[in-house]
Amino acid sequence: MRNSKNLRDYTLEELEALFTNRGLPGYRGRQVFKWLLKPVSDFAELTDLPKNLRQELAQEFSLFIPAVKKVETAQDGTQKLALELADGEVIECVLIPEEDHYTLCVSSQVGCAMGCAFCLTARMGFRRNLWPHEILGQVLRAKELLDQKKSPKPLRNIVFMGMGEPLANYENLIKTLKTLLHPKGFNFSKRRVTVSTAGLVPQIKRLGHEVTVRLAVSLHAACDEIRSRLMPINQRYPLTELLEACRSFPLPRGWRITFEYILLKGVNDTAQDARRLADILRGIPAKINLIPFNEHPLLPFKCPEERAILAFQETLLARGFVATVRKSRGRDISAACGQLATRLAA
Ligand code: SF4
């Protein structure tokens, strides 16, 4: 169990305040913060701090980083990291090689409470929220892996599309984003950090006013009847409310909201579905990401034929939308979208 507060749970401003409240100069907070961006887990490694301060901090705080339990590598170079948390829970994150950089797909919760019918993580149920240090720990472990490989390509993109609904862990998400985006922190570009949600409307409304990041919305159906069957959250926040929140989401110039749409054979993949999707998204700066379903024995859905996928895309393109078909990555190590579920992966 967790018995001391982890210093990576603090933003830079909070760390400065922590030190000044103890009568110490604020620059000590900045000094410590720099170390938190490296994979250090022992206060003895903070060599530019006085020894007595290191000892004092060690008595009260922790620098624990989730431990790498397993790394699996797919044929396409995608790597799935299983990380063990201080309480023994295991989470997963996925490092995806792109042409000139890497993208890391991070988890925000252990399990998930959203219950989406096509998702393996949903089968785990909800276990708990991740602390900022457990989300940042995924970034640190991925960077460490790239350093070990002497990778010439940097980790440039972070997507919150792993296990869990990030907006259901709102306070910890915001703190994590602040450290990821801060110029003195990990300094990721706001264009390259994407938060994906199943559609928690109140939190979508807050998010855009508190931090600037890309928003991705898991839509997966163009009418309430099908969406409620696939995603129980739709009964609480139906499509009209969700799309209204998207319409008023403050987007910087030239940005679009990404709408994720998993194509399920015979469920949401007809020409009528594609036309309805175009109709409901009209007027929203949108990019539609079509995801052919990754079949799994535990899930009762099939992937449509390729020509059905292309016809669906064509209908959207013909109506002036940007619509791409996502290439499945890491399929052979169950790292593809919706397949992260440590406790179920036999
Ligand atoms: S798709 Fe995302 S929101 Fe839905 S159950 Fe899976 S992890 Fe949760």
Image (cartoon, grey):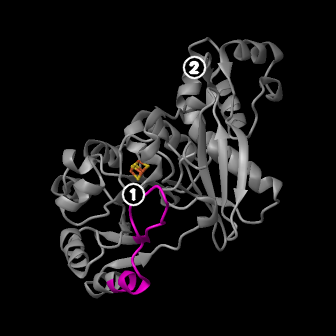
Q: Can the viewer see residue 248 in this picture?
A: no
Disc 1 versus disc 2: nearer the observer: 1
Q: Residues within 10 Å of mark 1 (few under 14, many from 20)?
A: many
Q: Secondary structure at mark 1?
A: loop
Q: Quadrant of residue 313?
A: bottom left
Q: Which residue is mark 2?
A: 18
- The amino acid marked with disc number 2 is Leu
Question: Could you say which is closer to the camera, residue 6 or residue 229?
Answer: 229
Q: Secondary structure at mark 2?
A: helix
Q: Do the residues bearing badges 1 and 2 touch, measured as CB atoms within 8 Å?
A: no
Residue 82 located left or right of residue 52:
left
Q: Can the viewer see residue 93 in this picture?
A: yes
x%, y% of residue 5? 60, 20
x%, y% of residue 295? 48, 65
Residue 276 located left or right of residue 330:
left
Residue in view at x 35 percent, y 44 percent: 114
x%, y% of residue 120? 47, 51
Instruction: Report how far apart the C-alphas of labels 1 and 2 lie in the structure.
Output: 44 Å
Residue in view at x 64 percent, y 47 percent: 139
Residue in view at x 66 percent, y 45 percent: 82
Q: Which residue is mark 1?
A: 118
- The amino acid marked with disc number 1 is Phe
Question: Could you say which is closer to the camera, residue 192 or residue 128?
Answer: 128
Q: Quadrant of the N terminus?
A: top right
User: Would residue 309 be counted in the magenta stretch?
Assistant: yes
